Image: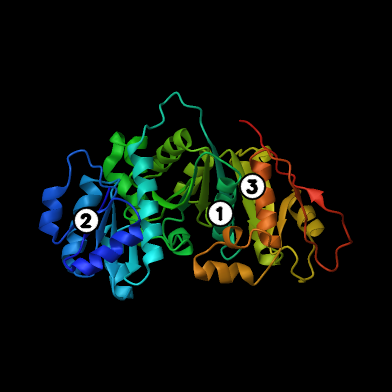
């Protein structure tokens, strides 16, 4: 049951109509605190524009510890950067403009999904494990995060029971901003839980994006990565695989200890490159490093992003240089950065776009669903018929 805190009766009534369910209304935060039930059935606390921002932040900071499944939704007459920053620090899950009643209704629906996910029965140790798909490239700027975000959405759209997207670029992760999320907690919050961390506690750190897709975002402060021990990363990923069908991991572009811990739990690695010599050089070194680490070649899959750029290199030359066959080729498009800037990944907004179709084909191959994917070629490459993705589901 959602509770609306708003002293202006007419404004509160407008919010009740927007929520579209049996919401209760209180005038002050004191009345709210007195009315909270012991069983924690309040899945959303909606703080209206009459509630002081500082008091709202203090309440959210308390509730994220005492009632992790409960979402705090802040309503402001104007949503400014300072308000968003305060909301992020205090653990509010969403900030909505007062006039955006549709957005308010959607935020409350998402809050109910979070509450159901975190309050429902948890997976047991004997449950079948999910599969971890790790997105890696030794070079920044190749579209690794964009691929990870869109692939996670595509896997969820393929009917997967549950998908979790993990941002393991602990210094400069962009998953939250790409999806325009306002996480109450991050991966750094797992550190104090230490040896007591289990799937129930871990799920309190997750931020939802849409049906069947949860995210575990990187710390807000870049220096927080120094406090996260590498063994904790392995434990977190194992726990997530016990509860989710697919765990998609976006990594930093380096072989640091956190990324190596993720490699140990990886079922399939997507190695991302683009058609430029510096990136190919770095990816070739990465392939040689993976050989030294004894990472199975059968679990590595080469993904060429912006594969139709006319830059004098072909996918055949990439295959020859790296000694790997291309598992998927994703075309270039101005729609991709446009969708990223709007916080609406292209797979969700333009499912018939060539980029979306390529990523959907990749997701289908991972999920074991036969999908024919067109492989874009540069002008200098010979014409080729559509081919099937080389990525196939494999067990360990």
Earlier sequence position, callout 3 versus callout 1: 1
Quadrant (top left/top right/bottom left/bottom right) for the C terminus: top right
How far apart, in angstroms, are the residues tagged by discs 1 and 2?
30 Å
Please tell me the numbered disc located at residue 148. 1
Residue 360 in the figure: left or right of residue 206: right
Please tell me the numbered disc located at residue 61. 2
Q: Position of residue 361 (x, y in %)?
A: 69, 49
How far apart, in angstroms, are the residues tagged by discs 2 and 3?
37 Å
Earlier sequence position, callout 1 versus callout 2: 2
Residue at left offset 67%, top offset 38%: 368
Residue at left offset 32%, top offset 75%: 80
Q: Quadrant of residue 232?
A: top left
How far apart, in angstroms, are the residues tagged by discs 3 and 1?
11 Å
Residue picked out by circle 3: 363
Residue 8 in the figure: left or right of residue 106: left
Residue at left offset 78%, top offset 55%: 374
Label 2 crowd (10 A; few <14 / some 14-19 / many >=20):
some
Q: Is residue 78 above or below residue 346?
A: below
- Residue extending farthest to the top is 126
Label 3 crowd (10 A; few <14 / some 14-19 / many >=20):
many
Label 1 crowd (10 A; few <14 / some 14-19 / many >=20):
many
Q: Secondary structure at mark 1?
A: helix
Q: Secondary structure at mark 3?
A: helix
Q: Is residue 334 above or below residue 104?
A: below
Q: Nearer the viewer, residue 97 or 164?
A: 97
Closer to us: mark 1 or mark 2? 2
Q: Is residue 68 above or below residue 336?
A: above
Q: Position of residue 369 (x, y in %)?
A: 69, 40
Q: Position of residue 8 (x, y in %)?
A: 18, 69
Closer to us: mark 3 or mark 1? 3
């Amino acid at each position: 049951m959602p509770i609306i805190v708003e002293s202006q009766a007419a404004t509160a009534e407008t919010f009740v109509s927007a929520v579209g369910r049996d919401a209760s209304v209180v005038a002050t935060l004191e009345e709210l605190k007195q009315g909270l039930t012991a069983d924690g059935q309040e899945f959303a606390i909606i703080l209206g524009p009459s509630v002081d921002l500082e008091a709202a932040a203090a309440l959210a900071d308390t509730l994220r510890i005492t009632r992790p499944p409960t979402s705090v939704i802040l309503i402001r007459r104007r949503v400014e950067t300072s308000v968003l920053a305060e909301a992020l620090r205090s653990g509010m899950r969403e900030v909505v403009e007062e006039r955006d009643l549709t957005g308010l209704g959607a935020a409350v629906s998402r809050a109910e999904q979070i509450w159901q996910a975190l309050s429902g029965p948890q997976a047991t140790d004997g449950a079948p494990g999910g599969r971890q798909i790790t997105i890696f490239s030794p070079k920044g700027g190749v579209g690794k995060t964009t691929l990870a975000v869109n692939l996670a959405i595509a896997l969820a759209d393929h009917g997967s029971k549950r998908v979790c997207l993990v941002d393991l670029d602990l210094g400069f992760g962009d998953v939250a901003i790409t999806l325009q999320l306002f996480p109450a907690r991050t991966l750094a919050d797992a550190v104090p839980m230490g040896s007591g961390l289990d799937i129930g506690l871990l799920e309190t750190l997750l931020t939802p994006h849409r049906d069947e897709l949860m995210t575990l975002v990187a710390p807000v402060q870049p220096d927080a990565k120094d406090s996260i021990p590498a063994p904790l990363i392995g434990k977190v990923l194992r726990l997530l695989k016990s509860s989710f069908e697919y765990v998609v991991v976006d990594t930093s572009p380096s072989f640091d200890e956190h990324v190596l811990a993720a490699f140990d739990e990886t079922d399939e690695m997507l190695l991302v490159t683009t058609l430029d010599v510096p990136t190919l050089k770095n990816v070739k070194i990465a392939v040689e490093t993976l050989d030294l680490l004894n990472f199975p070649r059968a679990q590595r899959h080469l993904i060429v992003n912006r594969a139709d750029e006319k830059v004098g290199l072909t996918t055949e030359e990439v295959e020859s240089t790296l000694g790997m066959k291309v598992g998927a080729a994703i075309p270039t498009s101005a729609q991709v950065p446009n969708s990223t800037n709007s916080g609406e990944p292209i797979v969700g907004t333009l499912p018939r776009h060539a980029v979306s179709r390529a990523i959907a084909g990749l997701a289908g191959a991972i999920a074991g669903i036969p999908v024919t994917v067109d492989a874009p070629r540069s002008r200098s490459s010979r014409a080729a018929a559509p081919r099937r993705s080389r990525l196939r589901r494999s067990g360990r």
